[in-house]
Image (cartoon, grey):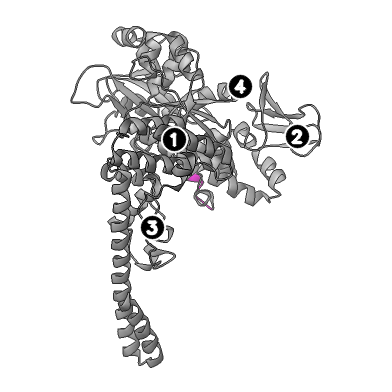
Amino acid sequence: MEDAKEEIRARLPVEDVIGQYIELKRAGRSLKGHSPWGTDRTPSFMVSPEKGIWHDFSSNKGGDIFAFIMEMEGLTFREALEKLAEQAGVELKRYSGGDKAFAKHKERLYEALELATKYYQFCLTKNKAVCEYVFYKRNMNKKTVENFRVGYAPSSGRALVDFLTKRGFTKKEMEDAGLLNRFGGDLFKGRMTIPLMDVGGRIIGFTARILTNDKNSPKYLNTPETVLYNKGRHIFGLSQAKDSIRRSEFVVVVEGNMDVISSHQAGVCEAVATAGTAMTENHLKSFSRMTNDIRLAYDGDEAGVRAAERAVQMASKFGIYLSVVDDYHGCKDADELIQKNPEYWHQAVRDCRPALEWLLEKYQAKYDLKTEKGFQEYCTEAKRLISQLDEKDTVLREKYERIVSERLGISLEAFREQKIELPKKKLKKPSADLSKSMNTGPSRAQKYLAALAKFGGVEVDEDLVIDGVSDDELELIFEQEFAKHSSEERKNDVETLSKRVQLEFISSERKRLSAAIEKAEADGNDEEMRRLMLEMNKLIKK
């Protein structure tokens, strides 16, 4: 299991693991904090990110991340290994027995990507036109280009393939690293390249921006998902931002990779970006290990509002304080604002507003409160948003209830007593594991219902919601099918889909019971046949 341990260590820096349990602060090249076991008055717990180890001087304990988890949670080594493997997204079964070849293959992919990065960096220095684009049009300075390892992919179509081939890499290795297109040539060509790095700074892929105004080509081209790169887990710029995040105790989540780069160059080095505007629980878990102050720098358009709302729904699980950066001085994003005046960006980050307050204002602007319909719709949305706050935080709940009631011109008691939501219908619960009972893969109705449960902000009977479908797929379904629906329409969608899923279950059960009855009859098992007939009769009555 040594290869598995090394892979976990590479994905989980020691400071990130320990930072989940202890507040760490920078002390030169190390980090320090109070002992979780001792009664030290001054910080006696030291962490060395460079060496990947820790030592507690008050209790004389020390070791790596596995030793820490074993000590903190009283686990065996195997239990600690499994816990950290799950956190890192490492499949231990791949490292058992003779599958060490897989670990070596992954190491080759890392090497190919690192070499590709150096090659692209070299190509940038040799192309005057691209240098002018990077340094003058994009306004990057030398330090920024080096820090983010910006490069250039030649436009010939096979430049990187030939370069890596000469250095002993196979086509299979290049393909698995996400470097080839479907024709076996370079995936990235004629583009400015920006490496995607894991939290430890290892290259796991690329994003590449087109240098021309060719409307037939996508502006950005990204590495497809590989064994190294997972879109739902990756956070762009985190390896460069993590020290600043710990020092400042906040993180700024922007929409684009160029927003991150411009922000770092402007001195706001706490900026990172997720893939698209979608925030996942994996992202929030990563942030919560370093800070509970997350500032979203999303656009104020409908997509930005939806993204912020989904983040609010998830944030309460992790005790995170969520705010929104929204003063862009008429600019469309952080990058444009920074080009206009970097100080405006610093001020906007400082003047962030509570996310729920921002969302309530967005919904207020969306509905016409002078009409009865708009009044009720805003009241419904406001109640739903406030309900997402922690039930124990009664003071904060009341604060926002008062804000909304004042905007509506009604008393706090009247707002609380408003009964404007559709009555909730109790659904029959067909099975604790619906998809398994149906003996098939998830149906369209099941996936749609799961998408609404995950991203729609509406209540869905949990016994009708399937597992096993990725968040990325569910989000895509939601964006395509339900994102433009009002909350009232989504409730109707849930009701329709719930009935459909129940009917699918009943139909599947009838087929299963019919086959079982035929078999019992053929076997001459009268007792089993009677039992199955009774079960069929109960099902028919539904």
Taking 148 as reference, is 8 above or below it?
below
- Residue 133 seen: yes
Dot 1 surroundings within 10 Å: few (below 14), some, or many (20 or more)? many
Report the residue marked by disc 1: 404
Q: Is residue 250 left or right of residue 481?
A: right
Q: Are marks 1 and 3 in contact (CB under 8 Å)?
A: no
Report the residue marked by disc 2: 35
Give the distance between the C-alpha atoms of the residues marked 2 and 4, in whole angstroms: 19 Å
Q: Which numbered tag is attached to residue 247?
A: 4
100 in the magenta segment = yes
* The C terminus, quarter of image: bottom left
Q: Which numbered tag is attached to residue 253?
A: none
Report the residue marked by disc 3: 424
Q: Position of residue 494 (x, y in %)?
A: 32, 54
Q: Are marks 1 and 2 in contact (CB under 8 Å)?
A: no
347 in the magenta segment = no
Q: Which residues are magenta?
A: 97-101
